[in-house]
Image (spheres, rainbow, N blue to C red):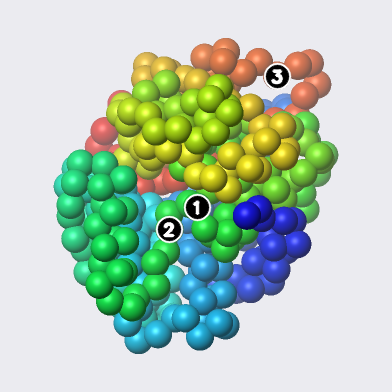
Amino acid sequence: MTVRVDDVRAAAERIAGRVRRTPVIEVAPGLVFKLELLQHTGSFKPRGAFNRLLVAKERGELTGLGIVAASGGNAGLAAAYAARELGVPARIFVPVNAPAPKVAKLRTLDAEVVQVGNEYAEAYQAAVEARDEGDALLLHAYDQPEVVAGQGTIGLELLEQAGSFDTVLVAVGGGGLIAGIATAIGDNAQVIGVEPELSATLHRALEAGEPVDGPVGGVAADSLGARRLGDLAFAAAQQNGVRSLLVDEEAIVAARNELWHEYHLAVEHGAAVTYAALKSGAYRPADGERVVMVVCGANTDPATLT
C-alpha cells in the first residue's frame, strides 16, 4: 500500500481549520525553518491524527468506544487532542520511561494513560491487544495511510509558503513525517532524512533493502525511538529517492542548545537532528542551495537547555 499526493491533498481539505498552518521563516540566506513546533500539542502529529480519525468517522468506524494509541509522547498527545476535539475517549499506551512532561500533558487532555514497557514497540503491542479485546479504533503513530497523508500536508504548505527551494531536511523515527513530506514534495526538491546514530531506522532499511528491526537509544529516543521503519515510509523513500544522514549524540545536544541560544526555539532532541546535520557538516549545502529544515517538536523540559 502506498500514499499518493492526491491523498495528501484530500487530507489537507479534511483537516483544514483543525490544525495550524505553521509559519516559515528564513533565518539566514538559504536556510528556512518550517516551525511545526507551533502546531497544536507542540508537534506535527495532530495532522495525521485528525486525518485518521476523520476518515474513520466518515466510514462509521469512530464510535463511542473511542481510540487506542501507543506513543513515546508526541503521537499520544496528538491522538488525545484529536479524540477530545471529536468527542471520543482515548486510551494512550506509553513506555514507562516516557518524559514526565509529556505524560502529564496527556492527562490534561482527558486521556487514560497506561505506562507499559521500556520502548515504543512494547507500548504498541499493548495498544494492539487492547484494540483486540474491545472495539476501539487503533491509531498508529506513523504507519497508517491516513496518518502519513496528514503529515504530508506540511509538504503542501511548504510548496505554497517557502518559494523555490532545493532540499528539505526531515527528522526520522518511524518515518510517517518523511513519508508524507516526500510524497507531497515529489520531484520539486530533494528530501533527506536525518537520524540519530543510535536510532537509525531509515538508514538500516535502505542498507538492507527493507525495513528491519534495530536498537533504540540515545537522547532523542523519546520522539525518534522506533525500532523499525514503517512500510509506508520505506515505499515513499524508494519512490522519491530519499536518503539518510546520521548525526551523533554530541551534535544533537549542541544543535538543540544552539537553537535555543540563537533563535530562542526550545525544541526536543528529536527536533534538533536536522540542525545538527547542518552544524556538524553531515550535510553541506552547495553554493546557492536553498534548504528548508522542518522544526518538528517542542515537547521538552526547558530546564535541560544549557
Residue type pointed to by label 2: His
Q: Write the residue at 58% across / 28% down.
A: 209
Q: Say which residue label 2 marks.
A: 140
Q: Depth-wise, is mark 1 or mark 3 nearer the camera?
A: 1
Residue type pointed to by label 3: Pro
User: Which of disc 3 and disc 1 is earlier in sequence?
Assistant: 1
- Tell me where residue 68 sits by quadrant: bottom left
User: In the image, residue 92 lies at what x, y percent?
Assistant: 28, 63
| Left or right: 277, with 64 as reference point | right
Q: Write the residue at 57% across / 13% down.
A: 281
Camera sees residue 206 = yes
Q: Say which residue label 1 marks.
A: 143
Whether residues under marks 2 and 3 lie with C-beta atoms below 8 angstroms apart, the answer is no
Residue 301 marker: none
As drawn, 66 above or below 292: below
Mark 2 residue element: loop
Residue type pointed to by label 1: Asp
Mark 3 residue element: loop
As drawn, 206 above or below 2: above
Q: Say which residue label 3 marks.
A: 285
Give how far apart the Cα atoms at labels 2 and 3 are: 34 Å
Assess disc 3: are there few (<14), some (14-19) or many (≥20) residues with their C-alpha within 10 Å of its C-alpha. Answer: some
As drawn, 121 above or below 278: below
| Left or right: 42, with 25 as reference point | left
Give how far apart the Cα atoms at labels 1 and 3 are: 30 Å
Assess disc 1: are there few (<14), some (14-19) or many (≥20) residues with their C-alpha within 10 Å of its C-alpha. Answer: some
Whether residues under marks 2 and 1 lie with C-beta atoms below 8 angstroms apart, the answer is yes
Image quadrant containing the C terminus: top left
